[in-house]
Amino acid sequence: MPELPEVETTKRGILPYLKGQTIKQIVVRQPKLRWPISEAIFNAHGQEILDVKRRAKYLLLQLPNNWIIIHLGMSGSLRVLLNPQQAAKHDHVDLTLENGVILRYTDPRRFGSWLWAKKLDHVTQLLHLGPEPLSDELTAKYLFSKAQNRHVPIKTFIMDNHIVVGVGNIYASESLFMAKINPNRKVNTLSLFEFEQLVIAIKHVLSKSIEQGGTTLKDFLQSDGKPGYFAQKLQVYGRDGEKCYLCQTEIKSQKIGQRNTFYCEICQK
Ligand SMILES: [Zn+2]
C-alpha cells in the first residue's frame, strides 16, 4: 500500500509536468473506484492546474475554481506518459494536458479515489485529520497533551490519523525502535522526553524514506514501470526471529490493534 513517502514522491514526480498546464481532456474508463467518480469532474476541461499539493495520503490538484483529490488506495499509481500509449486493463483515468503529457491512473484493486470538490473543507475525507508529521505542528508537547487520559498502546496512537497523519504500520514500528519505546506502552505513561525522542524518530524515518524515494522518480516516466516502493533498510519491521542490530536479541512480532508489530524487548522500554 502506498504510504506517505510514496505519495510525497509521487507528488514531486508529477508536479513539474502538471503545474501551469491546462487540462485538455479527461478520460474515465472505470468510474467505480472506492467512491464513484463524479461526472462533475469533466468540468475540469479547460482549467489550469495551478499547483499539486499533498495532505496526508491525498494528492490535491489545485484548479482555479476546484480541486481534484486523488487517493491511491491499496494498489493505485500515477504515471506521466510523454507519448500516447494504449490503455491497459486497470488504467482507469487519464488526464491529458495541453503539453501532450498524459497523467495515467492505474489501480487493479480499485480502492483508490478521484474526488471533485469546490473547496477542500467540503471534503469529508480531509476533515478532522491530525497535523502533517513533517510540519512544525507535530511536536512532543502536542502529542503529550493528546495522550493524557488515553490508554491505547503508543503504536495504535501514532497510527491514528486524528492524532497525526501518515505514520503507517512500517513507519510506526521503525520510529518506536529508534525512540527505544515499547509499542505496547500505554500512551498516558510516556514522558514528555519520550515523546520528544519519538517525534525526532518519526520525522527522521519519514524524511529518510522520502529522500530514498527521490531516486525512483525516473520510474514515473517509464511506460510499464510503477513507482518503486522503497527498499530501505528496516531495523525491525519484518525481521521477527532475526537478531536486533543493536543488542543481538531476537526481534519479536505481535499484533497490536490487528496490525503486525515488530520490536526488540531489550532495546525498547
Ligand atoms: Zn535490541
Image: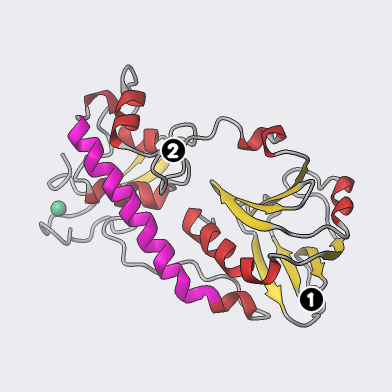
Q: Residues within 10 Å of mark 1 (few under 14, many from 20)?
A: few
Is label 2 within 8 A of ligand 1 (CB to nearest ligand atom)?
A: no
Q: Is residue 32 above or below residue 80?
A: above
Q: Position of residue 225 (x, y in %)?
A: 61, 77
Magenta stretch: give its range: 192-217
Q: Earlier in the sequence, mark 2 or mark 1?
A: 1
Residue 82 among magenta residues: no
Task: Using residue 28 as the reference point, say whether residue 172 is left or right of it.
Answer: left
What residue lies at 78% left-to-right and 40% top-to-bottom?
118
Q: Position of residue 27 (x, y in %)?
A: 86, 63
Distance CA(mark 2)–CA(mark 1): 38 Å
Q: Is residue 24 above or below residue 195?
A: below
Residue 20: image quadrant is bottom right
Q: Which mark is residue 99?
A: 1
What residue lies at 12% left-to-right and 59% top-to-bottom?
248
Q: Which mark is residue 164?
A: 2
Quadrant holding the C terminus: top left
Q: Is residue 184 above or below residue 10?
A: above
Task: Using residue 17 as the reference point, say whether residue 5 is left or right of it.
Answer: left
Asked whether 200 or 37 is in front, the reply is 200
Quadrant holding the N terminus: bottom right
Circle 1: element type: loop
Q: Position of residue 175 (x, y in %)?
A: 30, 49
